[in-house]
Amino acid sequence: MRKSLVDLVLRSEKRRNLLLFIKEEPRSIEEIKESFSLPAISILPHLKQLKEGKLVVRRIWPNDKVWKYELTPVGEAIVENMEALLDTLETLENNSDYWTLRNLEGIPPVLRGRIGELKYSKLMKPDLNHMFELNPEFVESLLQSERVLGCASYFHPSFTGLYLDLAKKGADVCFMLTDPVFERFKADFREEMCSLLGFENVSIFVFPEDSKVAGLTVTDRFFLLALFPEGEFFDNECLICSEPAAMEWGKELFFHLQKQATEVLEI
């Protein structure tokens, strides 16, 4: 009996890996055997099933006169979507306790659908002895950055000092604050906020309402995302990553949020 596409693709890791390997470029049986370190007898049944499912074809390549397997158009479409699904599952599995207990309302649906791009993110938890201090790894990477996009829905007294240090070094800085946080900074750090506005390389924006994202930082070096827990106090846990895909995802989230914000021209 012919397998359904779901059975064919998702219920066999070996067939999934074969599809991903063939996606890179057409492959001969010798190349497949070498890559998987398996004899032909272990591979051919899976290739036969993929052929019967119209996901791969086998044809001779004129240039080297070797029979090779390649994806069909249907196979290409399935593998593209399969990769996104596998990346999403890997992302959620890697930090399942974080993702399942967080409020994702601040992330637009289009970016939620691409959450697999964050699969290499590392969960950063605060040291219990320094619960309310910024993570040293975050601070070090931030101060080495040349371009910084930042967003915060919570108050931290270190923010203004960090952004001033970056501005003085010539880094391009753009950061957004929710209105209550902005008012708190104006009240407690008015001089520093005025100084920041005096730099041509600094832009400040304010949200009219809650952004639903606790914190977001995207630089030319790394990406950091902090989400509020569901129904609990903010625990300062966040995800950090330096992979280009995650950084691009973070930029898109920042610019999505920026559309709802108003630039601060004076304090």
Image: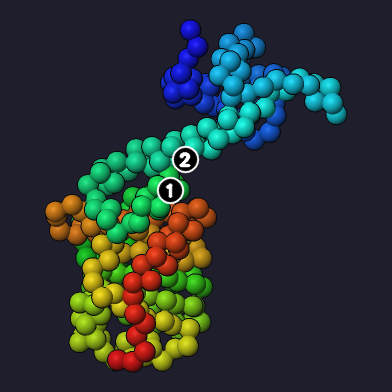
Instruction: Choose the circle earlier in sequence order: 1 or 2.
Output: 2
Q: Note whether 236 is above or below 2 in the view shown.
A: below
Work out how far the residue at label 1 is from the one at label 2, CA to CA, in angstroms. 7 Å
Name the image quarter holding residue 225.
bottom left
Q: Could you say where residue 145 lies in the image, as x and y percent from the top left?
A: 49, 70
Q: Note whether 179 is above or below 248 in the view shown.
A: below
For label 1, count other residues whose C-alpha is less than 10 Å away and answer few (under 14), some (14-19) or many (20+).
some
Please state which amino acid type lies under the numbered disc 2: Ala
- Secondary structure of the residue carrying tag 1 is loop
Q: Could you say where residue 181 lies in the image, as x and y percent from the top left?
A: 23, 76
- Secondary structure of the residue carrying tag 2 is helix
- State whether residue 13 appears in this view: no
What residue is shown with label 1?
Answer: 114
Instruction: Tell me the residue at 63%/28% (across/down).
Output: 72
Mark seen at residue 84: 2
Q: Could you say where residue 70 lies in the image, as x and y percent from the top left?
A: 67, 27
